[in-house]
Image (cartoon, helix red, strand yellow):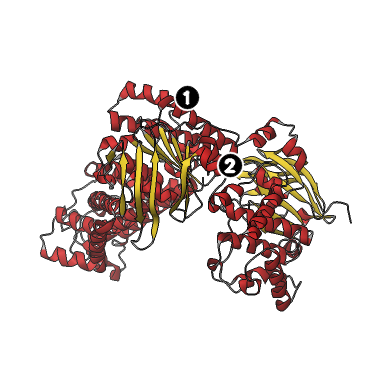
Amino acid sequence: MRLARAPLTAKLGLIIILFYILVALFGPFLAPHKQSDVVGSVWQPISKEFPLGTDNVGRDILSRMIYGTRTTLFIAFIATCLSFSWGILTGFFAAVSGGWIDQILSRWVDLLMAFPTLIFALVVLSIVPINMTTLILVMAILDSTRVFRIARALAADTVVMDFVEAARLRGEGTLWIIFREILPNTLTPLVAEYGLRFSFAVLFLSSLSFLGLGVQPPAADWGGMVRDNSLGITFGIAASLIPAAALAILTVSVNFVVDWLLDQTSSLRNQ
Amino acid sequence: MAEHLLTVKDLEIKAKVHRPGEKPFDVTLVDKVSFQLKKGKVLGLIGESGAGKSTIGLATLAYGRFGCTITGGQIILHDNNVLSYEGEALREHRGGRVSYVAQSAAAAFNPAHKLDEQITEVAINKGAMSRSEAVAYAKLLYKKLGLPNPDRFGRRYPHQVSGGQLQRAMTAMALASKPDLIVFDEPTTALDVTTQIDVLAAIKEAIHEFNTAALYISHDLAVVGQVADDIMVLRHGKMVEYGTTEQILYKPQQDYTKQLVAVRSVYKEEKPRTKEEPLLRLEKVTASYDGKVNVVQDLSIELEAGHTLAVVGESGSGKSTAARIIMGLLPPLQGKIYFEGKELTPRLKERDKEIKRKIRMIYQMPDVALNPRHTVRDTIGRPLTFFFGLQGKEREHRVVELLDQIEMGADYLNRFPAELSGGQKQRVCIARALASNPELVICDEVTSALDPLVADGILKLLMRLQEETKVAYLFITHDIATVRAISDSIAVMYQGKLVEVGQKSKILSPPHPAYTELLLSSVPEMRMGWLEEAISNRKMAAAGN
């Protein structure tokens, strides 16, 4: 897997993702204003002072975009990490154990997946207090069901291999089998899947914020910014398109990279 | 018409290899191979995997597997250059003038259509025959190929006939369009020996009866020797030797051919039985996967320390299940297993670590028995850490020692399985099993997936290791030659039951029970005329009964 031989799309995707990450990391140093400071009048056009204009209450859109990137990426990243750790662990455990353990875990996941994710999240978030922790937890738990399915399927393919049986006959424990025998053989597809689920998490968080149940004002995030400025569209003001474009570009970039990663796995398999 | 039906001249076939991280490069699969074939004659192509024999066979159909291109040479059939065919002419050629019999008939037939439909399809589509003619001809072919109930055979679906019958049905399919040339690609390799002999006889008779020419591809010289008029020995895409079957079998010129002829000549004197308590004893063990059908029934065997017991039988005889029972993967319904004089708990989970250390297993397919993401060091080192707590230098030292024992050495420490050959992988599996200093190693068909010469090397290695470490082997195999080579005692199994058990000398010398006789007489011998002899002996025995 060499970066130099990656297709142009993958390279472009990686550069854009790297840019987003840098912006998220160094946001407070880059942003010209605080995210909640009202610095101008409502919906000012693009100017030297406000490179992306101002929003519906006169805040600097560039600064809010920078802070928004930080919030959005941070929540999505942590939520995806949690959902992956939990999903992989339970998925592998189900595949390795088999029998009734597998049945119980799989049926539980079926039950969770029977509810439409967004509606489930809306119900839960309208009951519990909305803060960053609950938001991350709700997203992680809902997403872990998808990860469980994939991890279990991948592990089920590997667990029937003779080398896993050889480890069992030696008397190795479940954790060894999960982390040393199965995980290394399923890592590449899982990394690709991580990319996909991460972009879904960003979209999901934005949807929640757009509906008012995600990141709470005055903190900035992309979904919330689309909602805040959506009225402007009727007046021909493009402020809400800026966070929407940021979302679209990130999702496309992630998909470029994932496509390349998946190509790598299939060419490995064909060997 | 020319004297020769088929002329292959300076054939060169290359394949593009794509490795991640490297530029695609060409590999020569077939390098300047030439031969000629007359009508009604059979040419045997023989060689280990990767010798290019199937690639040559497919090239006569003007076909290259994915990524392969025919880059040079000529293939001339009936004075026409096959490689220049395109479109309609190519379609006419494939299946019409040359047909192909694949190794796995079960995978080659479409399970959703009846046999008749598939067998007559080519002849009808090419316009050579009407449907009723084609069906009538197919019935004739079934009869010639010795298929049961020829009038009704074709009305069945592929899953309703046995593996050997299906392979003969595929030969019928190849013959149905009355081709000039048939390419047989390892047609009996996937079959049991007792089935193989019937299929071989049927193929041989059909070729003579219909006077077609044939290319017979196999890795087994003894099999090719029965059906071929001429034999070409191939290695790494190059011709090693070419001659009549007689020349190749009795007067081989090249070293490689000599090795192939001498293969399976490994032999070990049996060790006499002692009065000591056997290392492993199975007492009337019965087991089942679903609780209804007993896969193993009343199995009683004994194995002494440092000895080799070969459990032999065809597929479905329950021999691999016996291994799973001993390993603790399938608790028996009835019966007891004794190890070192003590009763063994039936479930793996309830066995203590010491038992797991003493009983190890080696698998048939080294490709899936090694974790592709673990280096040779990790693979062999893990049991050392797990059972003896060895770490760091101590462990490294012992791993290298084991690598030396399997004749590989420290250079291989950092290699991944993908960087090893099939034989080397199996050697690493052997080292992994021996790393725990076991008392008993169960070898489940450990040589069946390997080329004959490589398999011989593995058998010799196992025998040497037994002398050095005094380990006992329970050797599960379908191959009598392997049994002859390494066992001290033999257990013959058929349909889950023990046919007979005893010392090697006793089992291998007559008189035999009927099944043992059948099994022993079905193993192809490295001489001409064996097939006819075996068949006529069988007919005589049947008439005598």
Q: Which residue is mark 1?
A: B409
Residue plotted at (64% across, 61% down)? B168
The quarter of the picture where residue B291 lies is bottom left
Q: How many C-alpha atoms fall within 10 Å of the one at disc 2: few (<14), some, or many (≥20)?
A: few
Quote the CA–CA distance across marks 2 and 1. Answer: 31 Å
Please provide percent x and percent y for residue A235.
29, 69
The residue that mark 2 highlights is B24
Residues packed near mark 1 inside 10 Å, few (<14), some (14 to 19) or many (20 plus): some
The quadrant of the rendering that contains the C terminus of chain B is: bottom right
- Residue B362 position, x and y percent, is 42, 39
Q: Chain of mark 1?
A: B
**Which image quadrant for residue A23?**
top left
* Amino acid at dot 1: Gly
Above or below, comparing residue A97 to residue A25 in the picture: below
Horizontal arrangement in the rendering, residue B337 relative to residue B147 (left or right): left
Q: Which of the two discs, 2 and 1, labels the residue nearer the N terminus?
A: 2
